[in-house]
Amino acid sequence: MQAPRTSMNQLAKAAGVSVSTVSRALRSQPSIPEATRHRIQQLAEKFGYRPDPMLNALYSYRKGVTKTEYRPTIAMVATSSDWKESLACRLYHEGARRRAEDLGYQVEVFVVEARKLSCQRLTGILETRSIRGVLTLPILDVSVNLELLPQHFLVVALGYKFQSAHINRVSIDHFSAMGQALEQLAALGYRRPGLVLRSESPRLAPSGVTHVGKLWEGSYLAERTRLFPDLDLPVIKPTNAHQLEHWLEQSSPDVLISQDLKVTRWMAEHHARFPIAYTMVDDDTTLTGIHQNSLQVGRRAVDLLVADLYRTETDSATAPVTLLVGTTWNAGSTAPHRTTGQAAPASSNDQTGHDDP
C-alpha cells in the first residue's frame, strides 16, 4: 500500500515555519534566507514531499509566471497566395485571429495551390498536427477543390464561395444590405439609383457557386419596386468601358451603386463628379455606402467553429447553419444629400471599396 503523501502543512509544522515560507523556499525564492531554504529542502527530501502538479499549474496561471502557453490551432485555408490583396480576406482573417486569441486558440493560414500544396497533402498535414477545425476564406481560385476538407474536419466557410452545401458558413447579409442602401439613397434624395456589378468570369464563377452579385441583384430588383416603383433601370455587368458609357447615356442614373473596382476607377477618371455608393467601405469611411462589418464575420466564424469543437458528439443529420452578419450605412462624402431636381452633386470618387474577393 502506498504511503500517504506528505502535505505542505505537515512540512511547515516540522520545519517550524509558515506554509508560505515553505512554498517560497521550495521554489528557491531569494526572499527566504539561504540557510532556511536549504533546511526546508532537506526536510522535504527526508519526508519524501512531492508538490501537487495541479496546484503548481494553478499557481502559475494565477501569478502569470507560465512562460510558454499552449494554444490549439485553427487552420484558415486560402486558395491563392495573393489572398491578402483582398480587403475582405484581410478583414476576415484579422477578426478571426483576434477572436481566436480571446478563446485561447491561434489561427494559422494554409494556402492550397495546385503546384505547391494540394488539398490532399494539406489534409495529411492537419491530421498529423491534430488540427480539427478549419476556416475557409472566400474562394479566390475555384479550380482548387476543397471538398475533401469537410470529410475530415469541422469546417466553417467565410462567405458563399465554397461549393459544398453541407458545411456551416458565416457571411455578410448581402440581400438586406442592398435594401438598406436603397433606403438610404432614397432618403438622400436620389430617384434613379443604378446598380453596376462585376462581370462573371467562368474561372471565378462556375456553375453551382452562389455569387454575391446575385444577392445584390435580387435584392436591388425586389426593393426598388417598393422604393422606386417607376424605376426600370437594367442592372449592368460591363465587360468594357464602352458598355458602361452606353448604359450611362441610355439609363441616366443619378447615383451608382458599385461593386466593381474597375468601374469606380473608370468613373473617377471620366465622371469624377458623379455620385457613387460603394458596396464595401470597411477600409475607408470617407466613402458613402455599406459598411459590411467584415471583422465580425471572422469573429463569428471562430465562435461557430469553436462551439462545434467543444461538442463531444456530432450529429451527421444536423442541417448546416448559415449565420448572417448585419451591415451598417456609412454616410461618407461620395454620394451627398441632394434635393429633387438638383443636378448630380460634385463628389470625389478617387477611392475604391469592394465587397468580396
Image (tube, rainbow, N blue to C red):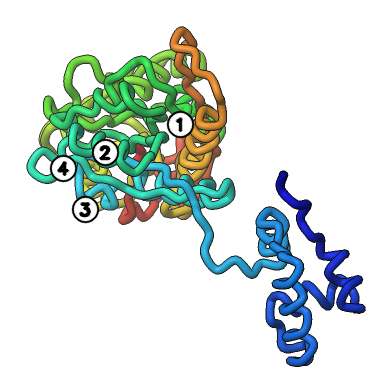
- The earlier-in-sequence mark between 1 and 2 is 1
- Mark 4 or mark 1, whichever is nearer to me: 4
- The earlier-in-sequence mark between 3 and 4 is 4
Kind of residue sitting beneath label 4: Leu
Q: Which residue is mark 2?
A: 260
Q: Which mark is residue 172?
A: 1
CB under 8 Å between callouts 3 and 1? no
- The earlier-in-sequence mark between 4 and 2 is 4
CB under 8 Å between callouts 2 and 3? no
* x and y, in percent, of residue 314 in the image: 49, 18
Q: Quadrant of residue 280?
A: top left
Q: Which residue is mark 3?
A: 269
- The earlier-in-sequence mark between 4 and 1 is 4
Q: CA distance from mark 4 to mark 2?
A: 31 Å
> Looking at the image, can residue 340 be seen?
no
Residue at image location 91% in from the left, 71% down from the top: 13
